[in-house]
Amino acid sequence: MNKHCLKLLYFLVLIANLCFSQRETEKWYISGPAALDFSSGVPVSLNNNGIILSWEGCSTISDATGNLLFYKHGNWLYNRNHIVTPNGAGLNGCNTVTQVAVFVPKPGSTTLYYLFIIGGPAANSSNRPWSLYYSEIDITLNGGFGDIAIKNMPVAASSGNCGEKMAVTKHCNGVDYWLLVHDITGANYKSYLI
């Protein structure tokens, strides 16, 4: 690598550290009482009583400043105090799906979040193929600790036959999102505009 490439690389790393990042993903609550905080740029262990008891499939979201809002595993939604929200039990899902859930801020709102879930309607359903569901979380409910306002809704009639993975990316318009899932059989991908 020549001297100019090294200077460019150094400059890009410096600029990247100064840029605003998406702080919604800084906290990770993972299996057991384990949790990680990436706000410093390196993972730091959090010892604050996370309750995830799953071998696979959990998801976490924080607010725009990096404060924990919710995490989900299996069929439960927990708030920042590590308590199941009043309407947070009985979510569709499955503990054996590797990427069972993903949180997405609702475009145009500062208080609403979508929770997309791959799984079945029965608790810990291992019935395949799975379907894609969503719930809507309102952080103004439950005294400001948030709760589910809309629960376990199918994304679309054609959202069945899902594999164990999904991905979300920001739309090029800077406001909306795209959600991608893969069929468990075949080579088909399905995309949904959020």
Image (spheres, helix red, strand yellow):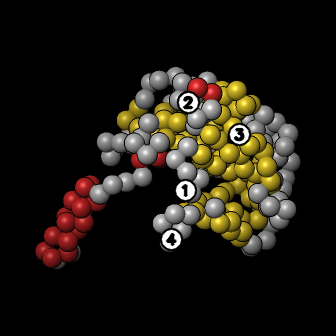
Report the amino acid beneath label 2.
Answer: Gly
Q: Amino acid at mark 1?
A: Gly
Q: Secondary structure at mark 1?
A: loop
Q: In terms of image quadrants, where is residue 144? A: top right
Crowd class of label 1 (few under 14; some 14 to 19; many from 20; radius 10 Å): few
**Residue at which label 2 appears:** 144
Mark-to-mark CA distance, 2 and 3: 13 Å
Spatial distance from mark 3 to mark 1, Cα to Cα? 17 Å
**Could you say whether the residue bearing mark 2 is in a helix, strand or loop?**
helix
Q: Position of residue 178 (x, y in %)?
A: 61, 65
Q: Which residue is mark 4?
A: 173
Q: Secondary structure at mark 3?
A: strand
First-in-chain label (2 vs 1): 1
Residue of label 1? 108
Q: CA distance from mark 4 to mark 2?
A: 30 Å
Image location of residue 70, percent across then percent down: 57, 36
Q: From what the image shows, is residue 63 above or below residue 168?
A: above
